[in-house]
Image (cartoon, rainbow, N blue to C red):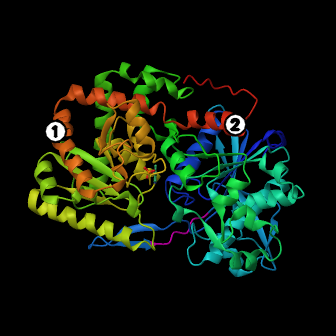
Amino acid sequence: MEIDQTLINSTEVAYISMEIALDSSIPTYSGGLGVLSGDTVRSAADLEIPMVALCLCYSSGYFYQLFNEMGEQKEKEIEWNFFYEFEKIPEPISIKIEDKEVFISAWLYRVIGQSGHVIPVYLLTTDVEGNEPWMKKMTGSLYDSTSRWNRIVQEMILGIGGVKLLKSLGYDNLKVYHLNEGHGSFAALELLKQNGGDMEKVKQKIVFTTHTPVPAGHDVFDYDLVKKVFLDRIPRNIKDLAGQNELNMTVLALNLSRYCNGVAKKHAEISRKMFPNYQIDHITNGVHLPFWVSKPMRKIFTKKWPNWRANPYVLQNSLELDDLDVFDAHIENKFNLISYQKGHSWNLLDEELITIGFARRFATYKRAVLIFRDIDRLGRICRGKIQFIFSGKAHPKDEMGKNYIKKIFESGQYLFDNYGVKVVLMENYNMDLSHMLVSGVDVWLNTPNRYREASGTSGMKAALNGVLNLSVLDGWWLEGYKMNDLAGWAIGPDDSDPNAAKNDWDIDANYIYELLEKQIIPAYMDHDTWIFRQKNAISLAAYFNTHRMVEEYAKKAYKLVKQRPWKFQG
Ligand SMILES: *Cc1c(COP(=O)(O)O)cnc(C)c1O
């Protein structure tokens, strides 16, 4: 079944992203960027936004993770078969890479909103008949790091191939191309070509969201490489558009978009410092609440507000929830997590103890090992009271990240041998495991270096499920903690302190120990206090929701005129 022509004709927004987390088992995501894209599209479908989405189809996706008995990460390739839930578009298109014609096809997946509105998601692939074997592999794996050549080619397929594909499918009424991070910036070059080089015209069509708060994180390509793959098919003024020394995908997007934003207030501020010549607004991230809510919590929300899914913003009234309902729902989640964990690890967790969770990509700036700074002090505080559960993948090329995994493993052994404190490390963090962790632990820990966490979203999922955040004041939590300081605790100073960005490990670790000892343990011992805080956390999640976020994009970025059926009561 193809997409209905009326739907195609009415589609105004093309959302372009290198990752999109459609389903836990579909390997089109590696972390937060993909989860955000997935949640964006899920909310856009619920809000009946006329949107189509583009990403690549990675047959061997991101890797499957295992740990050996030394706590070392082992990577296994996964082969994912895209044939089951998808259908292929009828006619491939082609783009030029070097002097070769490369065919691109796409698998179609439908995201369906609560009232049936469909957002088509096209996953582009070069695994097409007619392509030489090396061409077929170009969309093989996510963030293919074998060479810069592979990377630029993947970005050409996404940006140039994507725009051409939409045109060939008859999406003729697109008003906005939303580049979710700079990976898709070559779309702007294809649009320039389609619009006779008219920069102003193209600019009116492009909206850009940046996600990267450090200069080194932005995708750049050597002009020699650019020349090699594009030959003469690149605008003559490319250096004015994308940077004099190398082609910077962010600069290209900034120069060719009419609206640009960061993903949290602080992140936009940092981005404006990095790119002082541009206007960069902020739209703070969220999560798709109906997707991330656990079953027991969903049950009590539905009991209280039968129609909450239509307007998740009612969760702001969560203080009205019944104490016992919240308590029971959380206990059910905690038991689920612990019994699942018992089937997957030798080190068994204990239902009675305060369980602290930490799960995210093991990129070094996230400082997963900060909590072990003074390990004996931690052991003394936690003995008989607190246990830990960690999960996350390190990029295969990130040796530091892999060392952190090993360090967690070793610290766990030390804490257990000396204090009986359990630290469990779970393999292969993905969205399914994330669902269990963000609802089943009591406290969600986050310790990034300040102003490196563009937004962060796992803490929002935790709050939604009545899990309290214990986090450095960065990204969304800088905003969240200011809105409601009962939803969790802040590690270290806020951004009014000029020393905050020094990220002193001893100071930050000391904050954690003090909070654990003087606040978190006593609060947990007193059921009423804890449940009151849990309800505050849930009410905070009402704001950090992609319905609110997509509505902001619709108004400020897409400037959609047609009213949506959803009523935002902010
Ligand atoms: C939510 C989520 C993330 C993003 O978490 P951060 O807090 O932003 O690091 C990453 N991976 C998975 C599997 C997730 O579900």
Can you tell me whether the CB of the residue at mark 2 lies under 8 Å from the nearest atom of ligand 1? Answer: no
Q: Magenta segment, principal secondary structure?
A: loop
Vertically, is 355 above or below 408? above
Q: Is residue 294 left or right of residue 441?
A: right
Residue located farthest toward the right when viewing the structure as drawn: 196
In percent of the image, x 90 and y 58: which residue is there? Answer: 196
Q: Is residue 189 left or right of residue 119?
A: right
Vertically, is 352 above or below 502? above
Q: Earlier in the sequence, mark 2 or mark 1?
A: 2
Badge 1 is on which residue?
518
Q: Position of residue 377 (x, y in %)?
A: 13, 54
| Callout 1: SS | helix
Q: Position of residue 202 (x, y in %)?
A: 81, 51
In percent of the image, x 20 and y 35: which residue is there? Answer: 524
Q: Is residue 248 visible?
A: yes
Mark 2, other Cα within 10 Å: few <14 / some 14–19 / many ≥20? many
Quarter of the image with the C terminus is: top right
Span highlighted in magenta in the image:
76-81
Badge 2 is on which residue?
49
Q: Position of residue 223 (x, y in %)?
A: 70, 75
| Callout 2: SS | loop
Measured in 3D between alpha carbons, the distance from the residue under mark 2 to the one under mark 1, in whole angstroms, is 47 Å
Task: Give 470 or 11, whichever is nearer the viewer.
Answer: 470
193 within the magenta span: no
Amino acid found under the numbered disc labelled 1: Lys
Mark 1, other Cα within 10 Å: few <14 / some 14–19 / many ≥20? few
